[in-house]
Image: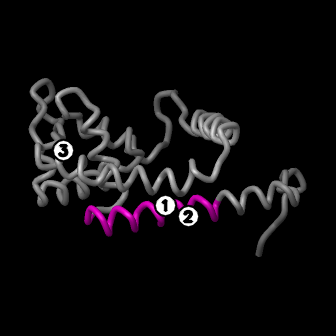
Amino acid sequence: MTTHNEDTRWLDDEEQRTWRAYLHATMLLEDHLDRQLQRDAKMPHVYYGLLVQLSQAPRRRMRMTELARNAKITRSRLSHAVARLEQHGWVRREDCPSDKRGQNAILTDAGFEVLEQSAPGHVAAVRQAIFDRLTDEQQKSLGEIMRIIAEGLQPNEAGADLPWLR
């Protein structure tokens, strides 16, 4: 049985339309990008994102905990993803010299090469799905809106219950 709290701020009709449009668009976008990368690079979008993170890190290496935080995925999911990337020879792990409990993920030359090969198709898919459809002003507004939402969802205080901190 559902109970309704009289203090609940329900979405009005316009907010409901906006919310549903957001959900619909983000699901379609993630599916579009995932299918493009699966087809062209034989990897899911999340793996591509991990390779990008590593390619931009100093010496193409990053602590696994930092990589999980940046990718916004649990350490368990990251460990599974990195294991798959290791099978392809795109990433390798090394123990962290400054912390014997930690590990670094390192982008291999083969991983960098597959990233270089898949980036043009991915950028084209992103451009076609988002930027080619929006005016310059809409792009600016979208960026500002997404930053505001992200800032509100990433608490900085210690002990925040976020999956990538578990």
At 38% from the left edge and 49% from the top edge, which residue is drawn?
Answer: 73
The circle drawn on residue 30 is 1
Contact between marks 1 and 2 (CB within 8 A): the answer is yes
The figure's colour scheme reads one colour
Mark 1 or mark 3: whose residue is earlier in sequence: 1
On the rendered structure, is 139 left or right of 122? right
Q: Amino acid at mark 1?
A: Glu
Residue 34 to residue 67: above or below: below
Total numbered badges shown on the rendered structure: 3
User: Which region is colored magenta?
Assistant: 23-42
Q: Is 36 one of the magenta-colored residues?
A: yes
Q: Is 69 one of the magenta-colored residues?
A: no
Residue 129 to residue 141: above or below: below
Mark 2 or mark 3: whose residue is earlier in sequence: 2
Depth check, mark 1 against mark 3: the one in front is 3
Contact between marks 2 and 3 (CB within 8 A): the answer is no
Q: Amino acid at mark 3?
A: Phe
How far from the left and from the top, in percent, is residue 165?
39, 40
Depth check, mark 2 against mark 3: the one in front is 3
At 38% from the left edge and 44% from the top edge, which residue is drawn?
Answer: 71
Where is mark 2, residue-wise? 27
Where is mark 3, residue-wise? 112
The rendered magenta stretch, by its main secondary structure, is classed as helix
Tell me the quarter of the image containing the C terminus.
top left
Which element carries disc 1, helix, strand or loop?
helix
Q: Nearer the viewer, residue 161 or 54?
A: 54
Tell me the quarter of the image containing the N terminus.
bottom right
Q: Nearer the viewer, residue 148 or 117?
A: 117
